[in-house]
Amino acid sequence: MHPKCSAIDCPRMHLIPEQWMGLVATGIFMATYIGIAIGCVPRLALDRTGIALLGAIAMVATGALSMPQALQALDAPTLLLLYALMVVSAQFRIGGFYTWTVLQLRRFMPREKLFLLLVMAVTAVMSAVLVNDVICLAFTPVLAVALLQVGLNPVPFLIGMAMASNIGSAATIIGNPQNMLIGQMGHLAFGPFLAWCSVPSLISLALAYGTIVWLYRGRFQGTVPAHIGAACWPPFNRRQSIKGLLATGALIILFFTHIPRELTALSIAGLLLCSRQMRTRDMLEQVDWHLLTLFCGLFIVIGGFMLTGLPAALVADLKGCGIDLNNLYVLTGLSALLSNVVSNVPATMLMIQFLDPVRVTEWYVLALASTYAGNLITIGSIANLITIEQARHYGIAIGFKEHARVGIPVTALSLLVTLAWIWLRTNHG
């Protein structure tokens, strides 16, 4: 690259004619998103992350995106915030805090409905602060074993946990990966986001609890299996857990200031790495490099697609037909639909390109709708997939139909709450 040319203006090495570049970029984008929707490639052991990574490589290799442009497409603040919060969460995982939290709830197991309520409430609160995917990864094994040991039907409790993690995570900017992306790219303040999104999240959580209690009435009891999968998790370390709680408290307080969130999170993560007991390698092993790679791949694929100009033209055509993405009600429906086609993270990364930077309500609505939509079917969110996969290790099968039986009414109610909240805030706010 010439030393004076910028990342945008630098000429690219094209493997194909320039006039075909837009078509190639569009083809790569469509192939990537179809692959993500399906979740695999026939005859290959590729998962969604691998598909996104291959799409990114194809964008650069074909010349649809130059290397500087690909690097510019990566949203560094979002990636750094996500990375730092994973390090903070590692403090709790290695210190056994997550395990200890679930085990403290066992005393309420004889009262199944109360136990379900507490599991969902604790999961929602912790997901709002410590990322929902991590909470599901840590809670599922402990909860599954505890339920099997006392002969309770684990399915409603695990489904309730997964759905509560999605709903609770919608309340804050740091609750899930797509909210982090929305918060960072929309330059949203932590406090107003919490104030706008927490009320519908609380109502939706209550409705989700009531739905599960109704659908599983008389079915909370199960049988104690002859064999329960081996349970192995870190012992509770009070000192390290308190250290993590203090660090998280400081983190939340600093999020209410004007200090960049990624800088705050990285600083707190750096302090936690300065430990005499927890090795750096052990903590960094808890970082979900798979998810970070997925983000990087999607940033590049979408960056290449946006350069074609086709997305902007398509949105303009839709607006001409009366389908305006900046209409909050339309935005709610379309984001919910797309989130269940390709999962909520890829859906958010695409739709965020068309939001109005000035109208913060659009960003709030996308955060709620895309996250709530994750409860509809199993592939709607990574939290669902984590819970189902972890439960399978203990002989617990949560099938697509079983999940959808709960997910469809819960998602419908949550989206109705969102629409009502939009109406209330726009007409009486």
Image (cartoon, helix red, strand yellow):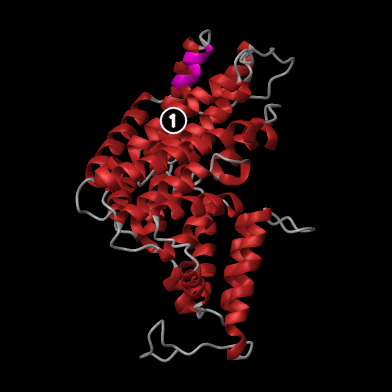
**Kind of residue sitting beneath label 1:** Leu
* Residue that mark 1 sits on: 205
Residue drawn where x is 58% and y is 39% of the image? 384
Kindly indicate the quadrant of the structure image that contains residue 199. top left
Residue 249: x and y in percent read: 27, 36
Kindly indicate the quadrant of the structure image that contains residue 274. top left
Kindly indicate the quadrant of the structure image that contains residue 280. top left
Location of the C terminus by quadrant is top left
Of helix, strand and loop, which one carries label 1? helix
Residue drawn where x is 62% and y is 22% of the image? 154
Residues rendered magenta in the picture: 112-118
> In terms of depth relative to the viewer, which is nearer, 165 or 357?
357
Location of the N terminus by quadrant is bottom left
Number of on-image labels: 1
The residue lying furthest to the right in this view is 43
Main SS category, magenta section: helix
> In terms of depth relative to the viewer, which is nearer, 387 or 5?
387
Residue drawn where x is 59% and y is 64% of the image? 53
Residue 231: x and y in percent read: 61, 24
Residue 177: x and y in percent read: 45, 50
Residue 43 is a magenta residue: no
In the picture shown, does residue 426 fall above or below 416? below
Residue 81: x and y in percent read: 37, 53
* Residue 187 makes an appearance in the image: yes
The residue lying furthest to the top in this view is 110
In the picture shown, does residue 283 fall above or below 50? above
In the picture shown, does residue 428 fall above or below 142? below
> In terms of depth relative to the viewer, which is nearer, 252 or 282?
252
Left or right, residue 102 beside residue 189: right
